[in-house]
Amino acid sequence: SLEGEALVEQAKKWVSSGIIEPSAGQAIMDLCGERSSWLDLRGQHFVLLGAASQMGPLRTLLEHGATVYAVDLPKPALWARLIRLARSAPVGAALVVPVAAQAALTEAAGDAAIAEVAGCDIL
């Protein structure tokens, strides 16, 4: 994976070879430089429909400290994966999980118990 100075150098190569527009290259360089604070998402809230999507932004949002209100189907294996992802996120990141109204969870409920009752089918 590319990050830091290696990403800046690659962005310059992409621009010079016409793979990306100069403005896209500049945006990448800005994010790697003095504007890296743009990636601090602590205190920012996002709602993700289809939160477990492999191509979705959940992992990135959590890695940057966001609070994510996750919406996805009630499938325990899916929610177990999302909960594991959230548990590995930095301090400050949060995953808000919808649970069935009749779910009898306590504050001491473990991740497996939460995954069993998590999710909603909005259709």
Image (cartoon, rainbow, N blue to C red):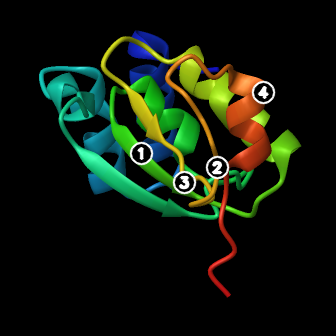
* Residue tagged 1: 68
Marks 1 and 4, how far apart at CA: 19 Å
Q: At numbered mark 2, what does the secondary structure look like: helix, strand or loop? A: loop
Q: x and y percent of residue 84 in the render?
A: 68, 23
For marks 3 and 2, the one nearer the N-term is 3
* Residue tagged 3: 98
What amino acid is at disc 1?
Answer: Val
* Residue tagged 4: 112
65 with respect to 53 (left or right): left
100 with respect to 23 (left or right): right
What amino acid is at disc 3?
Answer: Pro
Q: At numbered mark 1, what does the secondary structure look like: helix, strand or loop? A: strand
Q: x and y percent of residue 61 in the render?
A: 43, 38
Q: At numbered mark 4, what does the secondary structure look like: helix, strand or loop? A: helix
Quarter of the rendering containing residue 30: top left
For marks 4 and 2, the one nearer the N-term is 2
Q: Which of marks 3 and 2 is in front?
A: 2
Q: Which residue is drawn at 62% across and 58% down?
A: 102
Q: Nearer the viewer, mark 3 or mark 1?
A: 3
Asked if residue 13 can be seen in this view, the reply is no
Which one is nearer the viewer's eye here, 84 or 99?
99
What amino acid is at disc 2?
Answer: Ala
Marks 4 and 3, how far apart at CA: 14 Å
Mark 4 touches mark 2? (CB < 8 Å): no
Q: Residues within 10 Å of mark 4 (few under 14, many from 20)?
A: some
* Residue tagged 2: 103
Q: x and y percent of residue 1 in the render?
A: 64, 20
For marks 1 and 4, the one nearer the N-term is 1
